[in-house]
Amino acid sequence: MGTIISLDKKLKRSLDKQDAIIRKRKLLAVRKIFRCAHCTSKCEKCGVMITVDNRSNLPTFRIPYTFCDSCTEEYVDYIEALKGNEDSSLYWHNDAWMKVWATWIEHQGAVDSYLKSKEFEQLLDELKPNQT
């Protein structure tokens, strides 16, 4: 007679495997959000690594993002353009350029809102090590 297979054990192994796959997907989702959205060692706009040489020297209270020098200048130009103080010598600062900045800032706000959502908080809670 053959070996008797325990269906309960087989079902439990299958469920454990599914749980591990779901947990891994959750961890990857959280890791991607934090790596992409809140890395303090790269420019939030262009992604270049920020070093002592390309770190912005402008006061941080004016800029709510981590930018390299170039993106800092562009952001300040964008804010000035919103105030009506455009520099006509910067011909590439056209309507499309303004839309790129507006859309990027809107995206940052959406990411921040998502990170503060109750569902994301629930995801973080589910990923905490079990405390027994």
Image (tube, rainbow, N blue to C red):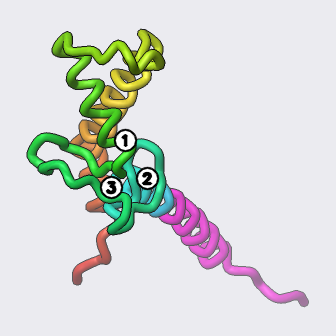
Q: Which residue was labeled with disc 2? A: 36
Q: Which residue was labeled with disc 1? A: 71
Task: Tell me whether the residue at label 3 lies in contact with that at label 1, contact meaning CB atoms closer than 8 angstroms.
Answer: no
**C-alpha span from label 2 to label 3:** 6 Å
Q: Which residue was labeled with disc 3? A: 38
* Location of residue 107 in the rendering, given as x and y in whole percent from the top left corner: 36, 31
- Which one is in front in this view, the residue at disc 1 or the one at disc 2? 1
Task: Tell me whether the residue at label 1 lies in contact with that at label 2, contact meaning CB atoms closer than 8 angstroms.
Answer: no
Magenta highlight: main SS = helix
The image quarter in which residue 1 lies: bottom right
SS label for mark 3:
loop
- Check disc 3 and give the amino acid type: His
- Rendered residue at 47%/19% (across/down): 92
* Location of residue 118 in the rendering, given as x and y in whole percent from the top left corner: 22, 43
The residue range painted magenta reads 1-25
The tag earlier along the polypeptide, 1 or 2, is 2
Label 1: few (<14), some or many (≥20) within 10 Å?
Answer: some
- Which one is in front in this view, the residue at disc 3 or the one at disc 1? 1
The tag earlier along the polypeptide, 3 or 1, is 3
Label 3: few (<14), some or many (≥20) within 10 Å?
Answer: some
- Residue extending farthest to the left is 61
**96 or 104, which lies in front?**
96
**C-alpha span from label 1 to label 2:** 17 Å
The image quarter in which residue 17 lies: bottom right
- Rendered residue at 45%/63% (across/down): 27
Instruction: In the rendered view, tell whether residue 95 sits above or below residue 55.
Output: above
**Quick check: is 46 in the magenta stretch?**
no
Apparent side of residue 110 relative to residue 12 in the rendered image (left or right) = left
